[in-house]
Image: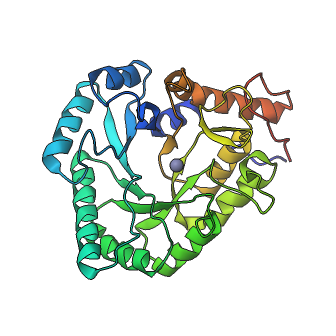
Amino acid sequence: MNAPHDFYTVEEIRNRLSMSTVVFWKYRPIGEATLSALARHGIRRIELLESPEQFDMADRGSMRYIEDGCRAFGIRIVAYHAHMTHFSGLDTEAKRQAQVDRCRRQIDTLLALGGNVWGTHATATDDTLLRCTTELARHAEGTGAVLLVENFKDDGLWVEDRVAFLDRVGHPQVGMILDIGHVRNREGANPMTIPGGPERVVALCRRHLRHVHLHGFREGVDHYPAFAEGDEILWVELFRALRASGYGGHINFESKGEPKHLDTIEATARAPQRIVAAEAAARRGDAPPAGAGRITSDR
Ligand SMILES: [Zn+2]
């Protein structure tokens, strides 16, 4: 007898879907026009990309303007992606403390907006990062905030390195953002495009996995819209692995937009249906629909 099939419904993915404002990065400011474009496509939750030329994530007053703008369109900020915030070059204790203090204020404004995911690009996985992270974790205790580091292609910043670091931190509110476009194997290929890869990488993250950066990947280039033409991500295997692991975070897409990709918001809004349809097709053994990415065979 077969075990009952357990996969996401379109509704479940939609309810947990969020979208990074990287879609507007360096091109369109966050405001009425951009927020209404998201709302028009049913995107109601966002991961806000740190953009100091537009707003200050460490300042409640500044973030209130963004909050008001979002509220007008029924959009909630669920995460901050403080991609310009890191802990390198802090060569004096005063500088280190100032940076930790700035991060504390970012976390506070995020919580005030009702968000819970605070992710940085923390570079070197070193003792300074460990110390800063430990102090910030203490600050977050008693709140719902999770403080996260992301994996990158550079040496020392791979999933394996981040997981080893998180084992050292050992705090339930400190974890990992899995960016599916930044993963590499020893041969330089992205395992998220190779059968068996998504399952292995999700397993590698273990309990540390708290957030995802999902985007299409083609010929070594990331941040495509999901299911873009030629997208090589094994979406079915990835979502099966997330489902099986009990991943409880936001289903967050981080595709870039204009001027490179013109239909990113539409593609992201359509992603839940496409993922569920691709999984159902894989189960039936059908060929993948055009543009649905490659599909792993059922085991
Ligand atoms: Zn990312």
Left or right: 5 in relation to 74: right
Q: Nearer the viewer, residue 4 or 68?
A: 68
Residue 105's spot in the image, x, y percent?
22, 60
Left or right: 252 in relation to 296: left
Q: Residue at x 80, y 48 (%)?
A: 194
Left or right: 169 in relation to 197: left
Residue 124's spot in the image, x, y percent?
50, 70
- Can residue 105 be seen in the rendering of this structure? yes
Q: Residue at x 46, y 78 (%)?
A: 169
- Can residue 20 be seen in the rendering of this structure? no
Q: Quarter-wise, where is residue 89 in the image? A: bottom left
Q: Residue at x 73, y 45 (%)?
A: 237
For the image, the number of numbered tags is 0
Left or right: 44 in relation to 244: left
Q: Nearer the viewer, residue 22 or 297?
A: 22
The colour scheme of the drawn protein is rainbow
Vertical side of 197 occupied by 47: above or below: above
Q: Nearer the viewer, residue 214 or 4?
A: 214
Residue 241's spot in the image, x, y percent?
68, 51
Residue 177's spot in the image, x, y percent?
51, 56
Vertical side of 296 occupied by 149: above or below: below
Vertical side of 165 occupied by 31: above or below: above
Q: Residue at x 40, y 67 (%)?
A: 173
